[in-house]
Image: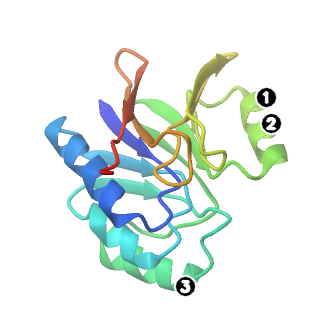
């Protein structure tokens, strides 16, 4: 299964739409957003995908974010979520809670930990857990998303170009 990974979109609708277009071109049907949507209106851009979203440190209007997420069929958006997909164990959170991150890695129970917050792409393995930060669409040296292939355990980093 191929999964689109995105984080730290911070209301940049133009770059989000570019990322969504890439995900659609690649026949991605599942999106994981690792926080800092910043506004509830961003969630509705992901209609048509199966989605998992978590809150980031810039996601202030939690009630409104959850209302729109529920309207779109994504369910509740919390600070972290754990789930099984394609037979793999996932933990998703924004990444600003360092003790939570360490505990998740040290537990050894996750195949994948998806996080954001730093605005820097990361892809590495600790123990049996692959840790992925897809980077950021906002305020980074480069604007990136990623695609995770759970069958091959490969992660593709994708740069999103900005129109100058």
**Callout 1: 10 Å neighbours few (<14), some, many (20+)?**
some
Task: Indicate the position of residue 106 as horizontal and vertical percent values.
Answer: 79, 28
Relative to 24, 108 lies left or right: right
Residue 93, percent from left and from top:
62, 51
Label 3 SS: helix
Residue with the mark numbered 3: 63
**What is the secondary structure assignment of the residue under circle 1?**
helix
Observer-nearest of 73 and 54: 54
**Residue at which label 2 appears:** 102
Q: Which mark is residue 72?
A: none
Residues packed near mark 3 inside 10 Å, few (<14), some (14 to 19) or many (20 plus): few
The single residue placed furthest to the right in the displayed view is 99
Q: Is residue 136 left or right of residue 51?
A: right
Residue 53 percent location from the top left of the image: 48, 58
**In the rendered image of this protein, does residue 32 appear above or below residue 85?**
below
118 lies left or right of 46: right
What residue is at 73 percent from the left and 37 percent from the top? 104
Question: Crowding near pointer 2: few (<14 within 10 Å), some, many (20+)?
Answer: few
| Figure coloring | rainbow
Q: Quadrant of the N terminus?
A: top left
The residue identified by callout 1 is 106
The residue shown at (36%, 32%) is 158
Badge 3 or badge 1: first in the primary sequence: 3
Q: Is residue 72 above or below residue 109?
A: below
Query: 7 and 161: which one is in front?
Result: 161
């Amino acid at each position: 299964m191929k999964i689109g990974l995105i984080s730290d979109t911070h209301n940049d609708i133009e770059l989000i739409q570019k990322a969504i277009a890439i995900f659609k071109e690649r026949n991605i049907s599942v999106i994981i957003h690792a926080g800092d949507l910043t506004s509830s209106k961003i969630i509705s851009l992901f209609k048509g995908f199966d989605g998992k979203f978590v809150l980031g440190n810039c996601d202030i209007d939690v009630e409104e974010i959850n209302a729109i997420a529920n309207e779109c069929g994504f369910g509740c958006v919390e600070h972290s979520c754990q789930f099984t997909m394609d037979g793999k164990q996932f933990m998703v959170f924004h990444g600003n809670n360092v003790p939570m991150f360490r505990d998740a890695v040290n537990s050894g129970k996750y195949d994948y930990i998806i996080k954001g917050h730093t605005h820097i792409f990361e892809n590495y393995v600790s123990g049996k857990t692959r840790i992925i930060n897809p980077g950021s669409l906002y305020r980074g040296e480069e604007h990136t998303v990623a695609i995770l292939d759970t069958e091959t355990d490969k992660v593709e980093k994708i740069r999103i170009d900005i129109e100058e």
